[in-house]
Amino acid sequence: MNAHVARLPDPREDAAALVVAVHAGNVLTTQRVLRRLDGEELRTLVQYLAACIDPDRPLLPTTGDRRSDEDIVESAVLEAASMFCIASDYVRSTSRHKLPLRARMVAMNAAHRLGVSAASIGRCLDRDHTTVLNANRRVAADDLLDTLAARVAERVIERVVGNTTP
């Protein structure tokens, strides 16, 4: 039995992961996304991204805008809570139980990937900026949490830019 199972290419998933990594300036994640693609998958990804470009619409609101930062963090918390099947208040809590802690780290990392500063994330969640930086390091070191944070960031982009509800 062949242990290698071929991955079905999904250009939307690859595009989202690539856009989030590039926007966040995360070189390692960008390289990881691109390295796992073969020639045909890379061509498909480029075609998909080219078809999605709308030069009149920015990817995200200006990150220097305090209200936009709050919207992004709040959206990240709501998406992470939904992904972990817990209440958003539990994500914002001071609980150190594994589930809300991981959801909180994913939300912090997703917001940071979208250009929100660690200080702004910390203010929105009543945490110190060093807590946010530590969460970013822990998420980057865990492939599953890193993938979840990329998905949360993708959903936040859809929510903030597209003004959609969860």
Image: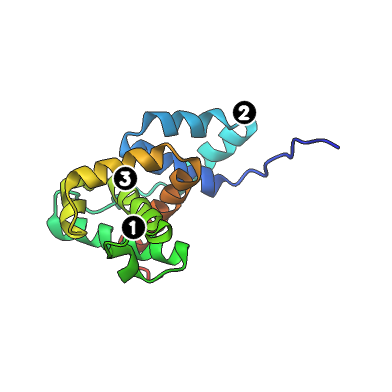
Name the element at disc 1. loop
Residue position marked by numbered label 3 in the rendering = 135
In the image, which is nearer the foreground, mark 1 or mark 2? 1
- The one nearer the camera, 150 or 90, is 90
Find the distance from the CA under tag 1 to the CA under tag 2: 44 Å
Q: Which residue is at 34% across, 56% downward?
A: 104
Q: Secondary structure at mark 3?
A: helix
**Considering the image in quadrants, where does the C terminus appear?**
bottom left
Where is residue 117? Give x, y as percent: 20, 45
Q: Quadrant of residue 156?
A: bottom left
**Residue 64 location (% of width, % of height):** 14, 49
Query: In the image, residue 24 lies at what x, y percent?
Result: 32, 39
The amino acid type of the residue labelled 2 equals Gly
Q: Is residue 38 left or right of residue 85?
A: right
Disc 1 marks a residue whose amino acid type is: Arg
Image quarter (top left, top right, bottom left or bottom right) of the N terminus? top right
Which residue occupies the foreground of this view, 151 or 91? 91
Colour mode? rainbow
Disc 3 to disc 2, C-alpha distance: 34 Å
How much space separates mark 3 and mark 1, taking CA atoms?
Answer: 13 Å
Is any part of residue 106 visible from this angle?
A: yes
Nearer the N terminus, badge 3 or badge 1? 1
Q: Name the mark on residue 96.
A: 1
The residue to which callout 2 is attached is: 39
The answer to whether the residues at label 3 and label 1 have Cβ atoms under 8 Å apart is no
Dot in front, 3 or 2: 3
Which residue is drawn at the image coordinates 54% and 39% (left, top)? 45
Q: Amino acid at mark 3?
A: Ala
- Residue positioned 45% across, 47% down in the render: 145
Q: Earlier in the sequence, mark 3 or mark 2?
A: 2
Identify which residue, 114 or 99, lies in the foreground.
99
Instruction: Give coordinates of residue 149: x percent, y percent.
Output: 41, 49
